[in-house]
Image (tube, rainbow, N blue to C red):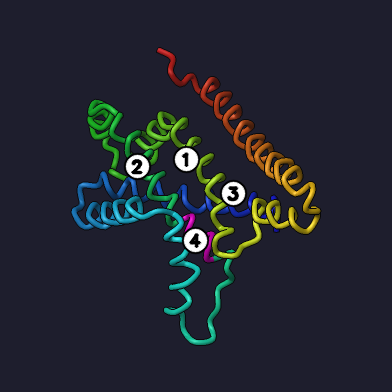
């Protein structure tokens, strides 16, 4: 439990949602109607429902549809709910990058005889991801902070333990002082992670020359 659980939950969800988000973005910009329809429906449905609702769906409704005798741990259900949710937002970020690429890039790739897969892997997708690094980092930071919502479904993440330790350690006369200190400590740890990640993003952007002409 605690901060390590929050960290693992965030990193795993990010690792799973990123490739799914890329596939959804490619599907939504595809010229094939079926892929475009499925990807668009997924993105719009997920983005239209709050994360807390998907967490409750995973915690309460998912076990009802599982075969008898099959159980999935609560942390795994929460992880997939967050991944499911975050992928839709990452897909829109990547789609924005794909749409920013000029038609000349596609025409040049076709002139070189590249297939659609080759053009996507070697030309368009790398440029799109490079262009939306700030947006992707912002989504990752938001996802890390959103992991605190798992406390609602009974998972003992960092914030849950920080809140639970207050009544166990405090006396009535100093309860509010302990409350402030404990929650301030939790806020500082969240800030340290997000600040470090944003600084790393700025260094990467500078290295890649984003925003330079």
Q: Earlier in the sequence, mark 1 or mark 4?
A: 4
Range of residues picked out in magenta = 77-83
- Name the N-terminal-most of marks 4 and 3: 3
Disc 4 + disc 3, Cβ < 8 Å: no
- Residue under pointer 2: 92
Of the pair 136 and 190, the residue shown nearer to us: 190
Secondary element at tag 4: helix
* SS state under label 3: helix
User: Residue 11: which disc?
Assistant: 3
Mark carried by residue 37: none
Q: Kindly report the secondary structure that dominates the magenta region of the rendered protein.
A: helix
131 left or right of 70?
left
Give the CA separation, mark 4 to mark 3.
12 Å
Residue contact at pointers 3 and 2, CB within 8 angstroms: no
Q: Name the secondary structure under disc 2.
A: helix
Query: Is 30 drawn above or below residue 93 in the view shown?
Result: below
Residue 80 is labelled as: 4
- Whole-number angstrom distance, CA of label 4 to CA of label 2: 19 Å
At numbered mark 1, what does the secondary structure look like: helix, strand or loop? helix
Any magenta on residue 78? yes
Q: How far is the residue under mark 1 from the one under mark 4?
A: 17 Å
Q: Is residue 197 left or right of residue 208?
A: right
Cβ atoms at labels 3 and 1 below 8 Å apart: no
């Amino acid at each position: 439990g605690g901060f390590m659980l929050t960290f693992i939950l965030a990193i795993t969800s990010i690792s799973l949602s990123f490739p799914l988000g890329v596939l959804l973005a490619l599907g939504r910009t595809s010229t094939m109607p079926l892929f475009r329809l499925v990807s668009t429906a997924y993105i719009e449905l997920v983005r239209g429902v709050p994360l807390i609702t998907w967490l409750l769906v995973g915690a309460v409704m998912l076990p009802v549809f599982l075969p008898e005798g099959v159980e999935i741990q609560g942390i795994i259900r929460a992880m997939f709910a967050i991944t499911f949710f975050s992928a839709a937002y990452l897909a829109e970020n990547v789609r924005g990058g794909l749409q920013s690429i000029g038609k000349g890039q596609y025409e040049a790739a076709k002139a070189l005889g590249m297939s659609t897969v080759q053009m996507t892997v070697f030309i368009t997708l790398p440029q799109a991801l490079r262009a939306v690094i700030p947006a992707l980092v912002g989504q990752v930071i938001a996802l890390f902070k959103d992991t605190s919502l798992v406390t609602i479904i009974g998972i003992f993440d960092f914030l849950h333990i920080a809140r639970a330790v207050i009544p166990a350690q405090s006396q009535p006369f100093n309860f509010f002082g302990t409350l402030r200190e404990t929650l301030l400590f939790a806020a500082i740890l969240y800030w340290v992670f997000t600040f470090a990640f944003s600084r790393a993003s700025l260094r990467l952007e500078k290295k890649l020359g984003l925003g330079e002409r």
